[in-house]
Amino acid sequence: MIIYRSLFRFNCFAFLLVILLVGLSLFYGLKVSDLFFYPYFSSSPNVALLTRTFQILCSVPVIVCTFTYGIAKTLSPRNPENRFILFSAVLTGAFLLNEIYRIHIYLILLGIPKLGVCLIYAVALSSYGWFFRRELKLTPYQILLAGLGLLFFAIAIDALQLKSKIIASLLEGVPKLFSEINIAFYYWYVCQNFVEKNVIK
């Protein structure tokens, strides 16, 4: 069956990826066991609670958009709006990967200034908004803008490097959390309406 062949290929790809990572670790003299190192754990349940909640929320748009695109491509492959859902999944997926693997920090360590990293993300976001401006106008894009506004506010607070850790964490963390609540809600709503409009007829 096709499903088993697809599953076999996916597992082969994942296995090759693991071999590649192990090989790279050995090549650079790193510990292979660190690849499976458990994330930071604290006996205090409040440690990183909202940060992890934020990361879970970041996964919502990716999953919803990817699933929606998969359905739409199967049932309505010629629909031009499918691209909007696909690139929404790619964009939010890139943000999720950056949030989990802290890619922007590695870019800074490679010598790319923080402003340069921000410009890269700004260009990607602006390109998304420009190419899909028509599709976005048909949605309650104000919710997305509110979420992005809160996110940029949080980034600006982080750049200020305030002396008070409590104030800094609240001014950065709370807007960041609510930014993803709004973004996740936006894509959930958009995908739900997309499915109702184009798939369920």
Image (cartoon, rainbow, N blue to C red):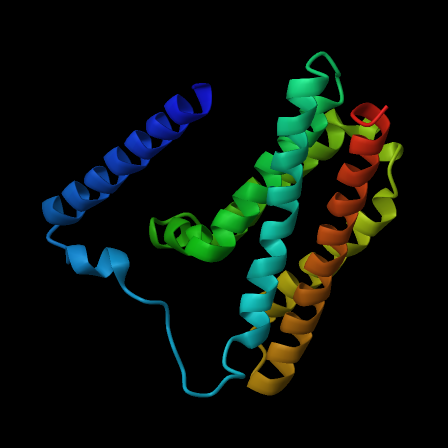
Coordinates of residue 143 in the picture (x, y in percent)? 83, 51
> Number of numbered discs present?
0
Residue at (18, 45) in percent of width and height: 22
Query: Outermost residue toward the top?
Result: 78
Quarter containing the C terminus: top right
Could you tell me if residue 127 is visible in this image? Answer: no
Depth order, front residue of 126/199: 199
Residue at (37, 52) in percent of width and height: 106
Query: Outermost residue toward the front?
Result: 1
Residue at (61, 79) in percent of width and height: 168
Asked where in the image residue 18 lies, by quadrant, the reply is: top left
Coordinates of residue 76 in the picture (x, y in percent)? 73, 17
Depth order, front residue of 45/148: 45
Coordinates of residue 71 in the picture (x, y in percent)? 66, 27
Quarter containing the N terminus: top left
Q: Is residue 182 above or below residue 10?
A: below
Q: Is residue 29 above or below residue 200?
A: below
Depth order, front residue of 77/149: 77
Q: Is residue 19 above or below residue 38?
A: above
Asked where in the image residue 36 lies, by quadrant, the reply is: bottom left
Residue at (59, 73) in percent of width and height: 50
Q: Is residue 30 left or right of residue 17?
A: left
Could you tell me if residue 32 is visible in this image? Answer: yes
Q: Is residue 169 left or right of residue 78?
A: left
